[in-house]
Amino acid sequence: MIRHFKIILLILTLAFPALSEAQKINQEQLISDIKYLSSDELEGRKPMSEGHLKAQEFIKERFEKLGLSSQYDDFTQTFSFTNRRDGKTYDKAANIVGFVPGSDSDKIIVVMGHYDHIGKNGDDIFNGADDNASGTVAMLALAEYFAKNRPKHSMMFVALDAEEMGMHGARALVNDFPFEMEQVKLNINMDMVSRNDNNELYAVGTYHYPFLKPILEKASTGKSPKLMFGHDEPGSGRDDWTNASDHAQFHQKKVPFIYFGVEDHADYHTPRDTFENIQPEFFKGAVELILDCIIALDTDLLN
């Protein structure tokens, strides 16, 4: 009996590295995180609401647990802005910023997703599960991976505030960036990555930065979901996502970007964008795919 136990233990030990390689992301944590960030308790994460402040603390606690450093006290870059729609000034908006130093370069890859959403309207809660608890949670999963597997580039992980009110968090980040902007080699933005009926995830930006496309094509070959390109050609109107989310602020600074996202669905910006309506297997696969792409970019951009 002892001999059989030792044999089984040996088989499991030999198999473990292969299992770890196949699943680089903590998938249970991924689903647990998006469930919490899109819960009614967080009230749609409108800037300066009680639920929004809970989201901030959740992200900061995760960064601290992972052992990330930061260029900002308590991981927090505070800023103020005035919302043009309601004329209200938000004087304690906050980006949450973590950092992993690179092993081979002082160049930086900025990985980000906005954590705010549009809050409540009467009794309706706009939970924003796909938009953009999904991108925030994906960023946390990537931060965990690179905290344990040191990248070649330094990596900044950012949960951005006030995207829904006009990309104010991204604008504050680039206007008060803690390094020379020339050090930023690449911006990765994730905004809506948890559901798509066609099993497609878009990587937007290669029209403007075509040198990135072969790296992404190679990294995504044979993977699910299918990585698509497009939505970035000038003159295509609303079909052009070049300025559709926070990556636009980096693009304006001439920093190459890749925006990972899905096409709009019927629940976009409605109270139906809930945890129950995400597609867990798609979400898990999308985050694994994004990670594979970033690993390839981290390696190839230094060659």
Image (cartoon, rainbow, N blue to C red):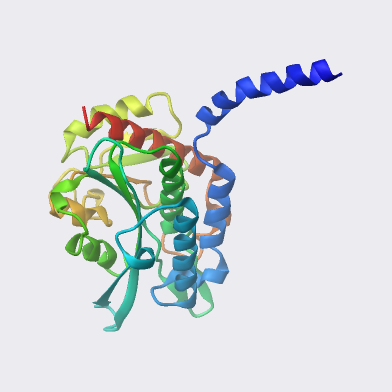
Q: Nearer the viewer, residue 202 or 289?
A: 289
Picture quadrant where residue 3 is located? top right
x%, y% of residue 285?
48, 37
Picture quadrant where residue 299 is located? top left
Answer left or right for 191 relative to 33: left
Q: Nearer the viewer, residue 188 or 221?
A: 188
x%, y% of residue 124?
52, 74
Q: Is residue 12 above or below residue 171?
A: above
Kindly identify the residue that appears in the image at 59 percent across and 45 percent down: 28
x%, y% of residue 90?
31, 79
x%, y% of residue 251?
17, 51
Answer left or right for 120 relative to 161: right
Q: Report whether residue 267 is seen.
A: no
Kindly identify the residue that appears in the image at 69 percent across and 19 percent down: 10
Q: Nearer the viewer, residue 98 or 287?
A: 98
Kindly identify the residue that appears in the image at 53 percent across and 46 percent down: 279
Picture quadrant where residue 167 is located? bottom left
Q: Quarter of the image containing the N terminus?
A: top right
Across the whole image, how many numbered discs are drawn on residues?
Answer: 0
Q: Report whether residue 145 is seen.
A: yes
Q: Quarter of the image containing the C terminus?
A: top left
Q: Is residue 273 above or below residue 286?
A: below
Answer left or right for 300 relative to 260: left
